[in-house]
Image (tube, rainbow, N blue to C red):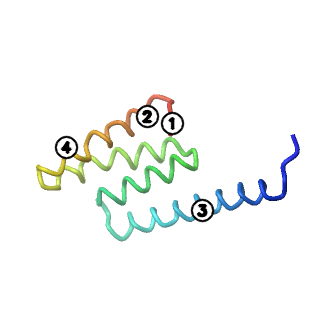
Amino acid sequence: MVMSRRSVWLIVFGLLAMQAALALAEEATRIAPGDMFAEMALGSAEAAMHNRAESLAAWQSAPAAAEKMEPDAQPSWVPDIERQIAANQGGAGR
C-alpha cells in the first residue's frame, strides 16, 4: 500500500497532537494533583498513545477525586470513570 504525502502528514500531525495532549495532561496533574478532570485527561491521553498501564493508573486515581465532589455531581462522572477503568483492565482499549 502506497500512502500519499497528505496521508503521511495527517498521521504525523495526529501523533504530534496526541503527544502534545499527553504533555498538557501531565502538566495538569502536576499543577492540580488529585484533580478529577486532570486525571481523566491524563487517562485519555495515555490511552490514545496506547500506554495502557499508565492510562489505567490515571483512571484509577479519578474515583478518589470524584468523591471530593458534591454528592449530586458524582453520579454524572463515576460511571464513566468506572467504564474507563474496566476498558483499560480488560484489553478492550479506546
Q: Which residue is mark 1?
A: 93
Distance between the Cα atoms at labels 4 and 1?
Answer: 23 Å
Q: Earlier in the sequence, mark 4 or mark 3?
A: 3
Q: Position of residue 74 (x, y in %)?
A: 18, 48
Element type where label 2 sits in the image: helix
- Residue at 84% of width from left, 53% of height from top? 4
Distance between the Cα atoms at labels 2 and 4?
Answer: 19 Å
Q: Is residue 52 above or below residue 40?
A: above
**In the drawing, what numbered circle is on residue 14?**
none
Name which residue type carries label 2.
Ala
Q: Earlier in the sequence, mark 4 or mark 1?
A: 4
Q: Earlier in the sequence, mark 3 or mark 1?
A: 3
Distance between the Cα atoms at labels 3 and 1?
Answer: 19 Å
Residue 5, quarter of picture = bottom right
Element type where label 3 sits in the image: helix
Q: Position of residue 76 (x, y in %)?
A: 23, 46
Which of discs 4 and 1 lies nearer the camera? The answer is 4
Name which residue type carries label 1.
Gly
Q: Earlier in the sequence, mark 2 or mark 1?
A: 2
Name which residue type carries label 4.
Pro
Q: Earlier in the sequence, mark 2 or mark 4?
A: 4
Distance between the Cα atoms at labels 4 and 3?
Answer: 31 Å
Distance between the Cα atoms at labels 2 and 1?
Answer: 6 Å
Q: Which residue is mark 4?
A: 75
Q: Earlier in the sequence, mark 2 or mark 3?
A: 3
Q: Position of residue 28 (x, y in %)?
A: 40, 67
